[in-house]
Amino acid sequence: MYYGYVGVRLRPGGRYAAEISGAGQRMWLGTFNTGVEAARAYDAAAWRFGRPRHTMNFPEVRSLVEAERHTSEPHFVSQEEARRHRHGQWRIAIAEADERFMAQYRRDHPEDVQFERAFWKQKKHERRAARAAKRQRKAAIKEEYAKGSASTLDPNSDQWLDIVSSTASEDTDSDLDSDDWD
């Protein structure tokens, strides 16, 4: 990020590069003379991806057409940069087509969307239940050792190490906590 512009960074040569992430990949949009030009290129690409306006550099722009009108062409220093730009534009077009296809699929097959949501919700509950059971076993074993009584598990055994190490990192429930699946 450069001076509050999302997707813009200053390059060593004094120009500004614009990049955007989409479809699981980072896409290079080009090199520009000013940070504002690079930010406007980022916003045009963000409009193409259907990103919300509040995440853009210039949220006052109201449409893709208006965003593209304010965007200047990137400045290419070499043929390699021009090739990277063409490749990035190609990848953006593919990502747009994927998004359109998935939106159409969700409209045509709402039962599949509901099934998938139910599946992942069930998986989340199963994982939480497994973690809770593992924590209970760990607490019981620790309590048994604290009392000084003999345990059924050797503290050097693989099972003991598995219980202790896996529950230590699972105290945060970050696994599938998206509101999309609830």
Image (spheres, rainbow, N blue to C red):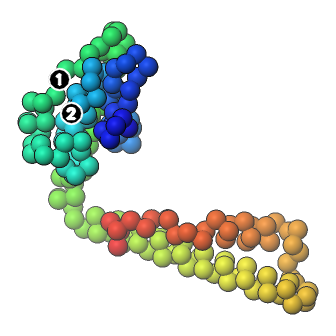
Q: Amino acid at mark 2?
A: Arg
On residue 49, the disc is none
State the image quarter where residue 73 is shown.
Answer: top left
What is the crowding at mark 2: few (fewer than 14 residues within 10 Å), some, or many (at least 20)? many
Q: Residue at x 21, y 33 (%)?
A: 40
Whether pointer 1 and pointer 2 mark residues with C-beta atoms closer than 8 Å, the reply is yes
Where is the C terminus found, in terms of image quarters? bottom left
110 w.r.t. 69: above or below: below
* Residue named by callout 2: 40
Judged left or right of residue 170, residue 47 is left
Judged left or right of residue 136, residue 5 is left
On residue 72, the disc is 1
Q: Residue at x 87, y 72 (%)?
A: 155
Residue 156 visible at all: yes
* Tag 1 secondary structure: loop
Q: Residue at x 19, y 49 (%)?
A: 53
